[in-house]
């Protein structure tokens, strides 16, 4: 069957849009574009990615064991994880917007790579098996277990990054698990993932610009949110303020600068500080932005950073509903 090289897909009722290239499945293309469509196994077994094709044609590109009923076929239902788009499509499919929509999952991943981000910080790159992609929202955390050591860590990458999951592990921040990462853990080793946890997630439908405020490794879940916002191609202005209390503490400075270079709507301010002083940072952003109430503010860092920042924002009447915080 002939098909367009790139098919345009509109999802109802959200009206989100994305493109399907080559023989990509509709589900893979949607996830890469930052959409949180319902799915489970991602390989044709569970039926959770079932969606109704309102218009356009699809083509099967992967075997599936799940069987649609005759009535479902008549109504235009298909499995998004096993089909691609032959041309432009309109699809009726629910999307997850809240953490409560995502079920807890347990998956055994493998260490794909480890890279030092400084003397006491390691980038841990895990990959889930081909048949068990982890479902989560940007900004959420997972419980990681290797051997007998466990830690709950924020995911530092975007759900749009296929089977790849990144974490920033501080030597002094993850107990026995951190000791394993800095000691005996090797590429190829198994790490059990359980989760996701937390409601530090992007409010993608908010019309407001965003201030991301991070201190030290609070950057990890903020990075996940920013990458998700970029995948969704949000047009609102995004400002990142990153406090670092150690020399070379802006450990992904080049990445942040590359975002600022590439995106017209993104700005980056690295700030060196002696401590994670959230109240001082709120004064700083208040001096740069006349009306803070025009923003959603995402805060991530230690409690000593979050509490004073939250109090300072409350004192100036900043709406609670526009404040999203993650204590690490
Ligand atoms: S996600 Fe399980 S069948 Fe598609």
Image (cartoon, rainbow, N blue to C red):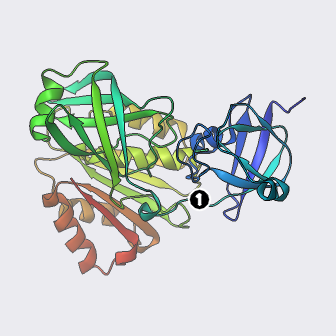
Nearest the camera: 110 or 278?
110
Q: Quadrant of ligand 1?
A: top right
Looking at the picture, tell me which residue is in the foreground, 160 or 317: 160
Front position in the image: 310 or 188: 188
Question: Residue at label 1?
Answer: 95
- Label 1 packing within 10 angstroms: few (<14), some (14-19), many (20+): some
Q: Is residue 54 above or below residue 223?
A: below
Res 100 quadrant in image: bottom left
The image quadrant that residue 199 belongs to is bottom left
- Give how far across and how far down residue 309 sits, in percent: 22, 66
Q: Is residue 282 left or right of residue 130?
A: left
Query: Can I make out residue 180 in this image?
Result: yes
**Residue 314, position as x, y percentages in the image:** 26, 77
Looking at the image, which residue is at 53% across and 59% down? Answer: 96
The single residue placed furthest to the right in the displayed view is 2
Q: Quadrant of residue 6?
A: top right
> In the drawing, does residue 259 fall left or right of residue 191?
right
Q: Is residue 119 visible?
A: no
């Amino acid at each position: 069957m002939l098909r367009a090289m790139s098919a345009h897909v509109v999802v109802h009722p959200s009206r989100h849009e994305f493109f399907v290239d080559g023989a990509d499945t509709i589900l893979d293309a949607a996830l890469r574009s930052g959409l949180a469509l319902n799915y489970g196994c991602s390989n044709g077994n569970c039926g959770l990615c079932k969606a109704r094709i309102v218009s356009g044609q699809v083509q099967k590109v992967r075997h599936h064991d799940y069987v649609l009923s005759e009535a479902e076929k008549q109504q235009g239902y298909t499995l998004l994880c096993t089909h691609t788009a032959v041309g432009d499509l309109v699809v009726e499919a629910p999307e997850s917007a809240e953490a409560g929509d995502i079920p807890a999952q347990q998956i055994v991943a493998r260490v794909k790579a480890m890279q030092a981000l400084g003397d006491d910080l390691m980038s841990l790159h895990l990959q889930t098996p081909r048949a068990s992609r982890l479902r989560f929202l940007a900004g959420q955390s997972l419980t990681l277990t290797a051997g007998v050591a466990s830690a709950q860590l924020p995911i530092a990458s975007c759900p749009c990054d296929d089977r790849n999951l990144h974490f920033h592990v501080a030597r002094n921040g993850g107990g026995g698990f951190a000791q394993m990462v800095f000691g005996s853990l090797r590429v190829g080793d198994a790490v059990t993932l359980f989760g996701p946890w937390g409601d530090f997630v992007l409010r993608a439908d908010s019309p407001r610009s965003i201030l991301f405020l991070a201190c030290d490794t609070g950057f990890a879940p903020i990075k996940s949110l920013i990458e998700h916002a970029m995948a969704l191609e949000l047009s609102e202005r995004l400002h990142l303020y990153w406090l670092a209390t150690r020399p070379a503490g802006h450990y992904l400075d080049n990445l942040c600068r590359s975002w600022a270079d590439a995106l017209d709507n993104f700005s980056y301010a690295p700030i060196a500080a002696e401590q994670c002083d959230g109240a001082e940072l709120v004064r700083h952003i208040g001096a740069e932005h006349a009306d803070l109430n025009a923003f959603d503010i995402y805060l991530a860092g230690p409690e000593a950073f979050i509490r004073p920042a939250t109090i300072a924002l409350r004192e100036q009447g900043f709406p609670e509903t526009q404040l999203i915080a993650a204590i690490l």
